[in-house]
Amino acid sequence: MIIPSTPSVTRILQEVWKPLSVLFVWDVVVTVVYYFLPFKAPGLPLTIFGSALALFLGFRDNAAYARWWEGRVLWGQMINASRSLARAALAFIDDATATGREIRRDIVTRQIAYVHALRAALRRQNDCPDLERLLSDDEVNLVKQRRNVPNAIHDGTGYLVAHARRIGEIDTIQQAQIEAVLVDISNAQGGMERIKNTPLPMQYRFFPALFTRVFCILLPIGLVETLGMATPVGSTMAGLMFLAILQIGEDLVDPFANSVHDVPLSAMCRTIEIDLLQALGEPAPEPLAEVKGVLW
């Protein structure tokens, strides 16, 4: 996630420079043809075209931002549910016995491993080194046999809570309360997976890109008679605005894409790890800092 409130012009140009360069060359060609060949620029209703395109791009960007914001809300719920799970485990399970202390710590560390595994799964990363750091080798090998690694870790936490009830560390009411938190965590994961695995409809992806490029092609033809030799500059600047708006939708449509525009999953996983380790009374790492204006 980009932290500075002012967008970087350099970053914007890095994302749109290719179509913008093609547009500038096309603007120059149209201008040269207009001045040196018997060419009459047709009158084009660019205002109508531009207004319709702006509305279309606005609808599409709103849909993309809704996906991004829902992803952020779901991760906020995940942070809250992780804290609630740790608080319930530490409050309900007595630490007077070695078994109780081990179960308490296992529930908390498994939740930390779970959010790291979920982050890697949403970003389509095959490897998650945090699992080896937080789980035993046998447990890592066991969960990696499942297609959905975070869900496998989450299932194991549920089995651990059931085991704590069977040996008398918690009662059935306390188990039900912890299970309710585990259900909230599962619901949040399901919402994230829905966003990740369900792209925008084809119409939302194809037609805005097509109409924007068609409009950029028509721009210099409609402006050359008015702007004259300044057509390449004026048309390119107008095209930059539409191309930038188009790119905004592309950047926001997948909030878990591991790009500079996505929800800062690494920072939020670190927040969960810090809060849960401190709840255990163990040393915790420092919060993640932004890197060149980006929080990952």
Image (cartoon, rainbow, N blue to C red):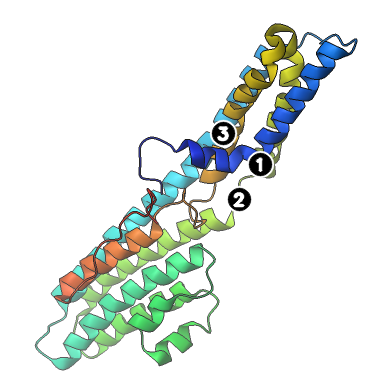
Left-right relation of 87 to 25: left
Tag 1 secondary structure = helix
Q: Looking at the picture, which amino acid does disc 1 mark? A: Arg
Marks 2 and 1 sit apart, C-alpha to C-alpha, by 9 Å
Marks 2 and 3 sit apart, C-alpha to C-alpha, by 21 Å
Q: Looking at the picture, which amino acid does disc 3 mark? A: Ala
Q: Which residue is mark 3?
A: 244
First along the sequence among labels 2 and 1: 2
Q: Residues within 10 Å of mark 3 (few under 14, many from 20)?
A: some
Q: Which residue is mark 2?
A: 199
Residue 184 in view:
no
Q: Which residue is mark 1?
A: 205
Q: Position of residue 40 (x, y in %)?
A: 85, 8
Q: Position of residue 44 (x, y in %)?
A: 76, 12
Rendered position, 127 above or below 212: below
First along the sequence among labels 2 and 3: 2
Left-right relation of 242 to 163: right
- Residue farthest toward the left in the current orientation of the protein: 96
Which sits in the foreground, 161 or 42? 42
Q: Position of residue 286 (x, y in %)?
A: 24, 65
